[in-house]
Amino acid sequence: EVQLVQSGTEVKKPGESLKISCKALGYTFTDSWIGWVRQVPGKGLEWMGVFFPGDSDTRYSPSFQGQVIISANKSITTAYLQWGSLKASDSAIYYCVKSGPDGWTNAFDVWGQGTTVTVSS
Amino acid sequence: IQMTQSPSSLSASVGDRVTITCRASQGIGNDLAWYQQKPGKVPHLLIYGASALQSGVPSRFSGSGSGTDFTLTIRSLQPEDVATYYCQKYNRVPWTFGPGTKVEIK
């Protein structure tokens, strides 16, 4: 079964750094884009960016470029989303997503369970 | 490229045919997906390639369109279809989502 298993809830203070993770299971990790989608509670879905583990190509939304870093370690089939200095406005649910369902379609056919990040002083 | 959806919300009766529209500000070919997010749940893929039904999705859902105008149709609305529906383009970065359409039962 194809799954994306995300790390747990985080509560941080403004200015702190954070790295959340997404473990990919059940498919060839290097064959699909893996990325992140943000959802502020009560709001819509925001595409943040994607990483292609096959060649480390990384693409960001202009809204998130310079604000976060998306990376992955293909040896352990895990993707990451990291912040250097969190703001209260980063409080949201972050979903890990995989492109598919075939090799030439970049819809998101598998979603992780979501990681809730709360940034508060 | 901006993505818009209409309506932003709708209320319909069980058994009704429901249509949601998604428009791209520039042509995107067929590179459009639809997602369903039930309250408090993770979104999941319904349609990709504008009209291809994702495995496991009920056949009452269908998608159509190409270029700039796309439609998601629920042939006979069921109580379990209460959700917010999002379109998303993926032809070129950024793979933007539409703002969503909330569907409720009347």
Image: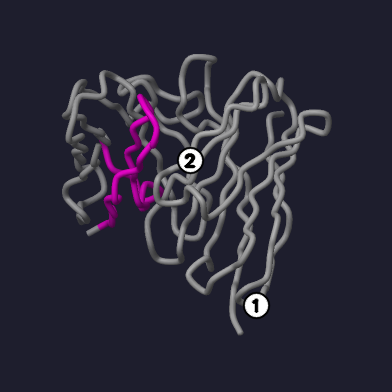
Q: Is residue A29 left or right of residue A120?
A: right
Query: Which residue corresponds to mark 2?
Result: A60
> Where does residue B29 sit, x and y in percent of width and height?
26, 19
Quadrant in which residue A118 is drawn: bottom right
Does A44 appear above or below A56? below
Residue type marked 1: Lys
Where is the N terminus of chain A found, in terms of image quarters?
top right
Does B100 appear above or below A40? above
Residue at image position (68%, 30%) is A2
Direction right: furthest residue: A75
Dot 2: what SS? strand
Q: Is residue B101 left or right of residue A90?
A: left
Residue at image position (69%, 21%) is A30
Along the viewing direction, whichever of A34 and B34 lies nearer the viewer: A34
Where are the magenta residues, as a range?
B76-105
Along the viewing direction, whichever of A108 and B47 lies nearer the viewer: A108
Residue at image position (48%, 47%) is A65
Q: Are marks 1 and 2 on the same chain?
A: yes
- Alpha carbons under labels 1 and 2: distance apart: 25 Å
> Where does residue B67 sit, x and y in percent of width and height?
19, 22
Does A80 appear above or below B8? above
Label 2 is found on which chain of the structure?
Answer: A
Direction front: furthest residue: A66
Which numbered circle lies on residue A13?
Answer: 1
Q: Residues within 10 Å of mark 2 (few under 14, many from 20)?
A: many
Dot 1: what SS? loop
Q: Is residue A19 left or right of residue B85?
A: right
Q: Earlier in the sequence, mark 1 or mark 2?
A: 1
